[in-house]
Image (cartoon, rainbow, N blue to C red):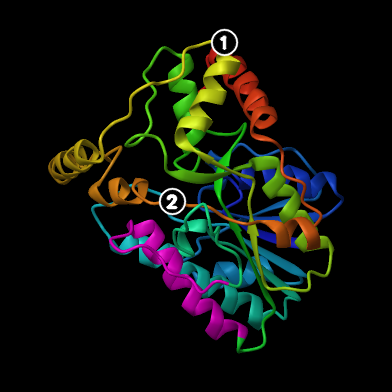
């Protein structure tokens, strides 16, 4: 099958593209700077110069393809030009779908985010049947991912078959991009840095191993999924539980105290002010602090049932992630 991929050099994409090639697919990969990106040497991989904000390059990439995998996203904590989030996460999605529609693509697979769906308490994890309810005061990333859902409904009405995947908190081996928050935390911890949870650590999040998300994408590309929306989830666990399991595998004492939400919020405002002065991306913003106050519990049973995804247990996934992190630190890679 010929597959056009946007965002194939990011954290998830850099794991997905090799898996597509190993499965025998022909991959066309959109690249903003082809000469600056290390790609696997493969006869079935074709770079396509372009940008998700340029309809002509998207149409060139989608030509003669059966499937478009749209992973491209603007993943940042902050941008001086707030419009960047809208241009890529909303506008880029709409243009990629339009290109797929004009080229007669059979299936358009959109990689969204759990943040587009909204928070949910552990006693009632969110499912695909629940109406999206993004949190108030959301980050610009979450806000624009939610806006893309409205574009999705309109585009599907034009006749394009759209399947949306909503991975929860991704973790596992891979490049330390903005999308690999857990990886960056674990690498910093292994290097001797601090680790702490937000508040008292009781907020429940859902953590999914990256290889499970790759398998979900392959299942959608190669199969005939009966539904149009799939939450790709792993285990629901409190932040305290997740870090405690990581500490046990590292042979370290688990964090005992968290950072109070008020302190997180104050730090967010201070770092946001500094960002406007220096242009340096802040590690936390007031919107991120608000996100950490919520529970993000999800039910991935539809993906398990219809896509054949069997979530990797957190302990197993963390063991693989820490082995990768240690190897990366020892080799001097970043």
Going 55% across and 23% down the picture, which residue do you hit? Answer: 246
Residue extending furthest toward the front? 123
Q: What secondary structure is marked by label 1?
A: helix
| Left or right: where 27 falls relative to 183 | right
Residue 212 higher or lower than 166, as above or below = above
For label 2, the SS is loop
| Residue shown at 68% from the left, 73% from the top | 228
Crowding near pointer 1: few (<14 within 10 Å), some, many (20+)?
few
Mark 2 Cα within 10 Å, few/some/many (few <14, many 20+)?
many
| Closer to viewer: mark 2 or mark 1 | 2
Determine which residue is flagged by label 2: 295
> How many numbered marks are there?
2
Provide the residue designation for mark 1.
Answer: 330
Question: Which segment did they paint magenta?
Answer: 130-156
Q: Is residue 153 magenta?
A: yes
Place of residue 33 in the rendered image (x, y in percent of width and height, measured from the top left): 51, 48
Residue nearer the viewer, 73 or 323: 323
180 over 323 or under it: above or below: below
């Amino acid at each position: 099958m010929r597959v056009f991929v946007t965002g194939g050099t990011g954290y998830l994409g850099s794991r997905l593209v090799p898996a597509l090639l190993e499965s025998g697919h022909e991959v066309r990969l959109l690249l903003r700077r082809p000469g600056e990106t290390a790609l696997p040497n493969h006869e079935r991989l074709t770079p396509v110069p372009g940008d998700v904000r340029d309809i002509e390059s998207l149409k060139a990439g989608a030509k003669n393809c059966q499937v478009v995998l749209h992973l491209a996203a603007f993943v940042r904590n902050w941008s001086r030009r707030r419009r960047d989030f809208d241009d890529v996460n909303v506008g880029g999605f709409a243009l990629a779908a339009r290109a797929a529609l004009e080229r007669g693509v059979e299936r358009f697979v959109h990689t969204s985010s759990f943040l587009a769906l909204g928070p949910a308490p552990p006693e009632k994890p969110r499912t695909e049947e629940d109406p999206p309810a993004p949190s108030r005061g959301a980050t610009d990333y979450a806000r624009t991912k939610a806006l893309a859902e409205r574009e999705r409904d309109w585009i599907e009405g034009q006749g394009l078959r759209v399947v949306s995947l909503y991975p929860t908190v991704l973790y596992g081996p891979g490049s330390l991009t903005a999308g690999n928050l857990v990886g960056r935390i674990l690498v910093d911890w292994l290097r001797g840095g601090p680790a702490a949870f937000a508040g008292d650590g009781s907020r429940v999040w859902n953590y999914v191993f990256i290889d499970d998300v790759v398998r979900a994408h392959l299942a959608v590309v190669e199969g005939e999924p009966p539904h149009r929306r799939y939450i790709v989830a792993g285990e629901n666990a409190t932040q305290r539980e997740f870090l405690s399991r990581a500490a046990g595998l590292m042979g370290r004492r688990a964090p005992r105290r968290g950072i109070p939400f008020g302190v997180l919020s104050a730090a967010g405002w201070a770092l946001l002010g500094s960002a406007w002065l220096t242009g340096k991306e802040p590690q936390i913003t007031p919107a991120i602090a608000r996100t950490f106050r919520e529970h993000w519990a999800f039910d991935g049973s539809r993906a398990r049932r219809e896509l054949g995804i069997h979530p990797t247990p957190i302990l197993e996934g963390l063991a693989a992630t820490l082995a990768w992190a240690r190897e990366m630190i020892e080799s001097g890679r970043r």
